[in-house]
Every structure is written in structure tokens, then in C-alpha cells.
Amino acid sequence: MRAPTVPDEIREACRIHARLLDAFIDLTQRELAQLTPGFIEESLTESLERLRAARKSYGGLASLVVIHSASNAA
């Protein structure tokens, strides 16, 4: 089965989005480490969960690109 073609521009955009999400996840984690339990901590924890979910979606596209590249090599 042939994998769908992903244009280079889309792959590059995904890499940039993923890199920015990684940086924001790191920043959020560092901010959380300084907080005491309470509303702000809960709010940032929820935001962190959403950021991680968004980051996973870009990882899924990266897998598609890797599979596509491997199938082209065969």
C-alpha cells in the first residue's frame, strides 16, 4: 500500500510547529515547578496536557513521512 505524499512545505511547517510546542512545553514545565498547588498550577497542568496532545499529532505526521520515505527507497 502506498503512503500518501506529504509536500516538503507541510513537513517543514510541522517540524517548526513541533519545535515551538517542545519549547513551550519546556517553558510551561519550568513554570509549573515554581508553583504551589492551587488554581494556577491546575490551569497550567491542563494547558500542558493540551500542548502534549498537540505535539503528539505532529509526531504522527512525522511517522507518516518516515514510512513514506522508506517505501520510496524500496
Image (cartoon, rainbow, N blue to C red):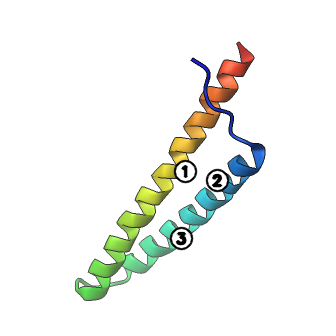
Residue at image position (53%, 46%) is 59
Where residue 33 appears, as percent x and y from the top left, is 37, 76
Residue at image position (73%, 18%) is 73
- Kind of element beneath mark 2: helix
In this view, 37 is above or below 63: below
Where residue 16 appears, as percent x and y from the top left, is 68, 59
Q: Are marks 2 and 1 in contact (CB under 8 Å)?
A: yes
Where residue 25 appears, as percent x and y from the top left, is 48, 67
| Amino acid at circle 1 | Tyr
Reading the image, the residue beneath label 3 is 24
Is 17 placed left or right of 40 in the picture? right
| Amino acid at circle 3 | Phe
The residue positioned farthest toward the right in the image shown: 8
Number of labelled discs?
3
Is 27 placed left or right of 4 in the picture? left
In three-dimensional space, the C-alpha distance between marks 3 and 2, rounded to whole angstroms, equals 15 Å
Residue at image position (76%, 50%) is 9
Classed neighbour count for the residue bearing mark 2: other residues with Cα under 10 Å, few (<14), some (14–19), many (≥20): some
Between tags 1 and 3, which lies in front?
Answer: 1
Reading the image, the residue beneath label 2 is 14
Res 58 label? 1
Between tags 3 and 2, which lies in front?
Answer: 2
Classed neighbour count for the residue bearing mark 1: other residues with Cα under 10 Å, few (<14), some (14–19), many (≥20): many
- Kind of element beneath mark 1: helix
Q: Quadrant of residue 4?
A: top right
Residue at image position (38%, 73%) is 47
The residue positioned farthest toward the top in the image shown: 74
Where residue 64 appears, as percent x and y from the top left, is 58, 35
